[in-house]
């Protein structure tokens, strides 16, 4: 027998799990990871798993993690796009799993891109 | 609980199951494990998506990519390309019937088939895993029950349903709220709620789909109904021919019990409610309410006269409230969003949405849910995609064996209970069987009457004997032995049966004959007077002839099973009508279009 509060908790937890099945209506934040051969070879899979872990830990309901192919800048892989609803796409390059918690905390949750990891910063060097 | 980055939804409805979706699920799991993706990708078996024509259907989220007619060998490609590398497999993507586009990035709701739909009863079908109560809960499941039990009085619940304008979706269209109210008003130590899931109409499968795709919606609604009328027990009468539905319903009831959503003192209130499943053996008459209740009691499934109505004396002689599956599927949403939300949709006297099962000569066979008042044309052409192979539309049969056939001139009728009755048919359970120029309307009437004669329980004479006599006349007509006066005799019998039969089955049995007589009387007359079937369908009135387009290739002569075709090589062949079996094999074989039906 579950109490009303317990049912509500199940509702919330399950919603975060099945939320990605809703059609995107511009309310979801999308994390898109380059997973072509170049990306995978450069270590994109651990990065993606790190994103999924972090999102689960924080119980974020409006974030989806998806993959995309090669966009041509293989030397910058692993590359990750973070797209907040209604905002410009921000592209991170040379992403490592240890960088993921900061990207999620500062950008996905608080909306402030981590400038030093972005493609803009990489191009300056 | 684990987060997955991608969900692969595979339709597990009866339609897609029969086109092999179970094998797909196995193969997906195998391939996903092989590629080490089992922690990232989850495969879920859902209920019906509605587009059965394109089955088996697979949707990959979060992209929302809609793959259709997926074969087991395609699974490898979807896993290695889409799931592993993020590249959509374009050539497997569903092709929109209206735009002929194969657009992998198109959202599901923008596809022409779904664009005109409004899914309330089918809201969770194809979205959630029906065997997982948590997913139903996440879609606001059991919130309506919570609201009813903790914030509403029994009278308020009934008022809300009354105000919503919801009418019985099983066919009759009786106001649901009134039924609830009558049962509420009956005084008794024990009352029952019951669910009619004995979907018997040929061509209707929405109830099955709801039970398969969203069983908890029915459980929740029945519990709400139980609270409102004061019943502590409910019965779901479901036909044994729906094994997947029965299984999922059983699982769902167990889960609901485990969570305390069925059982004693639900949510700590003094309301207790339990549900039981009873299997029907597939007798059409058991969809009639009194026969259904006799069957639940373990008696012979035969109707009895009303009154007393079930609201006064029903199951086990106690007041009983019986609703159809689709009716229940709307209840939780009405309680949750309010009667005004619901009655803002639809027409003046028919509110909300209705699910239709599209079948017959139509491109997109499947289930569609549209607001009441949508025209037949929108349903058949925009959503259904019209008749296949460029054939001309002739009629649509609505309402199953109790309904009628509507011709092209009535296609702009907005569909609701009253309009369909005015047009000479009825809503029925919502089956829509489309017929094209190749269908003979006399034969269609004969088909439905044949069904009725098979399914008549035999208790009352008009139905048992009357329909049999009508069938004999129709058989005579399609066999070319129709006589002057047959039409009048049919009409007389129809009138008598309608006014004297005991239950709904008999009272509506002549409808297919009457409506085809009304709209297609010329076809009956052609059969009887000219011994001709205008649709070239009735075998006895049909002749295959070889025209001068024949090149004498002998293909037809070789394929004929009766050796009825003769002729020299490179010369026009001839069919001997006495030997011809009218199987049509020669016509299919001919590459020159030289064989025609007359």
Image: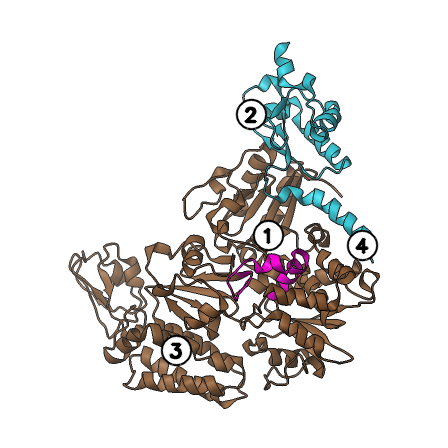
Residue B9 versus residue B304: which sits nearer the camera?
B304
- The residues colored magenta run B326-354
How packed mark 1 is, by other alpha carbons closer than 10 Å (few <14, some 14-19, many 20 or more), is: many
Confirm or deny contact between disc 2 and disc 3 (CB under 8 A): no
Question: Secondary structure under badge 1?
Answer: loop
Chain bearing mark 4 = A
Identify the element where label 4 is drawn. helix
Label 4 crowd (10 A; few <14 / some 14-19 / many >=20): few
Q: Which colour scheme is used?
A: by chain
Give the number of the mark in front: 2 or 1.
1
Q: Which of marks 1 and 3 is nearer the N terminus?
A: 1
Q: Residue B296: name its quadrant.
A: bottom right
The residue where tag 2 is placed is A70
Disc 3 designates what residue?
B514
Same-subunit check for callouts 4 and 2: yes
Point out the tag, 4 or 2, that comes first from the N-terminus. 4
Which of discs 2 and 3 lies nearer the camera? The answer is: 3
Mark 2 and mark 3, same subunit? no
Q: Which mark is residue B404?
A: none
Chain appearing in brown on the rendered image: B
Q: Which chain carries label 2?
A: A
The reply to the same-chain question for discs 2 and 1 is no
Q: Badge 1 sits on which subunit?
A: B
Expressed as whole percent of the image width and height from the top left, the position of residue B580 reads 27, 71
């Amino acid at each position: 027998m579950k109490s009303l509060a317990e049912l509500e908790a199940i509702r919330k937890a399950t919603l975060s799990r099945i939320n990605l099945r809703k059609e995107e209506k511009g309310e979801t934040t999308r994390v898109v990871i380059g997973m072509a051969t170049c990306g995978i070879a450069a270590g994109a899979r651990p990065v993606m798993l790190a994103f999924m872990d972090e999102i689960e830990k924080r119980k974020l309901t409006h974030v989806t993690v998806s993959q995309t192919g090669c966009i041509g800048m293989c030397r910058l892989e692993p590359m990750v796009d973070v797209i907040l609803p209604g905002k410009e796409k921000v592209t991170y390059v040379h992403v490592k799993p240890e960088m993921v918690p900061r990207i999620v905390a500062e950008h996905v949750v608080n909306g402030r891109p981590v400038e030093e990891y972005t493609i803009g910063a990489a191009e300056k060097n | 609980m684990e987060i997955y980055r991608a969900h692969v939804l595979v339709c597990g409805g009866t339609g897609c199951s029969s086109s092999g979706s179970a094998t797909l699920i196995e193969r997906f799991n195998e391939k996903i494990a092989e590629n080490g993706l089992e922690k990232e990708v989850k495969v879920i078996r859902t209920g019906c998506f509605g587009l059965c024509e394109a089955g088996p259907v697979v949707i990959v989220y979060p992209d929302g990519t809609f793959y259709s007619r997926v074969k087991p060998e395609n699974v490898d490609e979807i896993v290695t390309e889409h799931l592993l590398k993020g590249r959509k497999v374009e050539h497997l993507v569903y092709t929109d019937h209206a735009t002929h586009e194969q657009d992998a990035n198109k959202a599901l709701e923008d596809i022409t088939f779904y664009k005109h739909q409004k899914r309330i009863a089918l809201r969770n079908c194809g979205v959630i895993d029906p065997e997982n109560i948590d997913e139903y809960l996440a879609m606001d499941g059991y919130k309506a029950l919570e609201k009813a039990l903790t914030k509403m009085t029994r009278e308020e619940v009934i008022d809300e349903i009354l105000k919503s304008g919801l009418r019985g979706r099983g066919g009759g269209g009786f106001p649901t709220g009134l039924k609830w109210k009558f049962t509420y008003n009956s005084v008794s130590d024990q009352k029952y709620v019951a669910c009619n899931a004995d979907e018997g109409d040929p061509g209707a499968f929405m109830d099955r789909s709801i039970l398969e795709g969203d069983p908890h919606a029915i459980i929740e609604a029945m519990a709400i109904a139980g609270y409102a009328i004061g019943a502590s027990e409910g019965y779901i009468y479901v036909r044994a021919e729906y094994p997947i539905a029965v299984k999922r319903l059983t699982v769902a009831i167990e889960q609901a019990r485990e969570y305390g959503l069925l059982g004693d003192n639900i949510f700590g209130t003094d309301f207790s409610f339990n549900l039981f499943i009873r299997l029907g053996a597939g007798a059409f008459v058991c969809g009639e309410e009194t026969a259904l209740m006799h069957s639940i009691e373990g008696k012979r499934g035969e109707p009895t006269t009303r009154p007393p109505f079930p609201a006064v004396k029903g199951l086990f002689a106690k007041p009983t409230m019986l609703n159809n599956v689709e009716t229940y599927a709307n209840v939780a949403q009405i309680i949750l969003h309010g009667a005004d939300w619901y009655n803002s949709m639809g027409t003046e006297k028919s509110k909300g949405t209705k699910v239709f099962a599209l079948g017959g000569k139509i491109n997109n066979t499947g289930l569609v849910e549209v607001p009441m008042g949508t025209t037949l044309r929108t349903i058949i052409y925009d959503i259904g995609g019209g008749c296949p192979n460029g054939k001309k539309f002739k009629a649509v049969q609505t309402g199953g064996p109790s309904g009628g056939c509507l011709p092209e001139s009535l296609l702009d009728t907005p569909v609701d209970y009253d309009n369909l009755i005015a047009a000479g048919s009825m809503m029925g359970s919502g089956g829509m069987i489309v017929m094209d120029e190749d269908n003979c309307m006399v034969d269609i009437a004969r088909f439905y009457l044949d069904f009725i004669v098979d399914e008549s329980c035999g208790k009352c004479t008009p139905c048992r004997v009357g329909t049999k006599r009508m069938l004999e006349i129709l058989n005579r007509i399609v066999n070319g032995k129709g006589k002057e006066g047959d039409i009048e005799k049919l009409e007389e019998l129809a009138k008598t049966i309608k006014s004297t039969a005991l239950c709904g089955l008999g009272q509506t049995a002549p409808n297919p004959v009457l409506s085809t007589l009304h709209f297609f009387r010329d076809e009956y007359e052609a059969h009887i007077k000219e011994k001709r079937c205008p649709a070239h369908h009735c075998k006895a009135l049909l002749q295959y002839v070889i025209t001068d387009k024949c090149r004498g290739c002998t293909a037809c002569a070789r394929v004929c099973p009766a050796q009825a075709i003769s002729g020299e090589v490179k010369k026009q062949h001839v069919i001997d009508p006495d030997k011809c079996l009218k199987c049509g094999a020669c016509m299919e074989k001919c590459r020159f279009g030289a064989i025609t039906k007359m």
